[in-house]
Image (cartoon, rainbow, N blue to C red):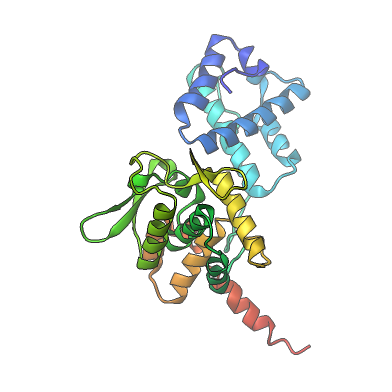
């Protein structure tokens, strides 16, 4: 990622400096960095294919590139944001005079409901109850799924939890979550979740583990025992898929589905939108509304009345 593509390197030291500054200096989130890197590399490969130099790119070319992209509208918006960002830095470093992507409009996209696969409250209960507690791995999986449900945390935040993340503020047990964008959030731990976590720590022998060591560990093959290595977000996705299948729950749900389920359940029971927004860690309430599946339930009730 550090090495600039040929089209940027051809602009000399300033181009290479801008490339490194944009990807290693300005973008702190590793997931955003990876997504932007893929988007920019794809655009530059397209520019090489039509034999246009970096300094000769026009707004029309950027628009043409977006039109030819065979991806969804949200992905096109991401591609345009990545291209704009890099070209902005190239302007600031006097590699190009103007940013040709600045005047290019992104495709319109409006969603009243997110695309996260749905999982219901009943299915969540069934999933937790289906885990037969025989090995430390079983206790770990139950604790992970319970954290996803009862904190509505993102899978990345759950994967990075440390032993010290589970603590007590003097009045109640809490989890300290490191969310995306460098945000730190404190979520109270309800009684049953605390029991799941304490049971897991006891069975896994982690009560005396150092505070900086991972809370959730990887499994040692098929032994059911745990290693000293921390689990990854991808590992948690596999855990959820495996446990759903073992429970006989036919759904394409992912760890993110628990956020939508928790948000909808709280809203169904009259919790204020701003409180749900705070729990989910959203800066904009419009994003929180995408997790609200109550509209889908109303639609189902309506279509059931059709008398054809």
Residue in the image at 38% along x and 63% along y: 195
Q: In which quadrant will I find the N terminus?
A: top right
* Residue 10 horizontal/vertical position (percent): 64, 12
In the rendered image of this protein, does residue 8 appear above or below residue 65? above
In the rendered image of this protein, does residue 87 appear above or below residue 281? above
* Residue 142 horizontal/vertical position (percent): 50, 60
Residue in the image at 79% along x and 88% along y: 308
Single out the residue that lies furthest toward the left. Answer: 170
Q: Nearer the viewer, residue 247 or 16?
A: 247
Residue 27 in view here: yes
Q: Nearer the viewer, residue 40 or 126?
A: 126
Q: Quadrant of residue 44?
A: top right
Q: Quadrant of residue 160?
A: top left
Single out the residue that lies furthest toward the top. Answer: 12
Residue in the image at 53% along x and 47% along y: 225
Single out the residue that lies furthest toward the bottom. Answer: 307
Q: Is residue 51 left or right of residue 260?
A: right
């Amino acid at each position: 990622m550090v090495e600039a593509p040929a089209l940027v390197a051809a602009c000399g030291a300033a181009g290479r400096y801008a490339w490194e500054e944009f990807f290693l200096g300005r973008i702190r989130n590793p997931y955003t960095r990876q997504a932007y890197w893929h988007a920019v590399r794809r655009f530059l490969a397209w520019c090489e294919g039509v034999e246009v130099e970096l300094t000769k790119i026009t707004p029309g070319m950027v628009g043409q590139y977006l039109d030819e992209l065979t991806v969804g509208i949200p992905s096109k918006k991401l591609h345009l944001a990545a291209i704009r960002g890099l070209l902005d830095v190239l302007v600031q470093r006097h590699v190009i005079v103007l940013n040709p992507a600045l005047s290019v409009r992104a495709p319109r996209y409006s969603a009243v409901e997110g695309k996260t696969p749905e999982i219901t409250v009943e299915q969540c209960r069934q999933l937790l109850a289906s885990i037969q507690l025989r090995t430390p791995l079983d206790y770990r999986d139950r604790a992970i799924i319970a954290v996803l449900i009862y904190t509505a945390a993102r899978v990345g935040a759950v994967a990075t939890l440390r032993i010290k993340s589970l603590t007590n503020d003097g009045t109640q047990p809490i989890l300290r979550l490191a969310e995306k964008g460098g945000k730190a959030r404190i979520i109270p731990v309800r009684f049953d979740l605390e029991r799941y976590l304490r049971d897991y720590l006891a069975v896994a022998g982690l009560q005396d583990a150092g505070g900086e060591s991972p809370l959730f560990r990887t499994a040692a093959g098929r032994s059911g025992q745990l290693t000293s290595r921390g689990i990854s977000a991808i590992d948690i996705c596999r855990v959820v898929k495996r446990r759903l299948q073992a429970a006989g729950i036919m759904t394409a749900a992912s760890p993110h589905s628990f956020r939508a389920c928790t948000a909808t359940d709280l809203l169904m029971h009259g919790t204020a939108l701003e409180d749900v927004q705070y729990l989910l860690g959203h800066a904009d309430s419009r994003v929180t509304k995408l997790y609200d599946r109550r509209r889908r339930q109303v639609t189902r009730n309506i279509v059931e009345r059709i008398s054809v």
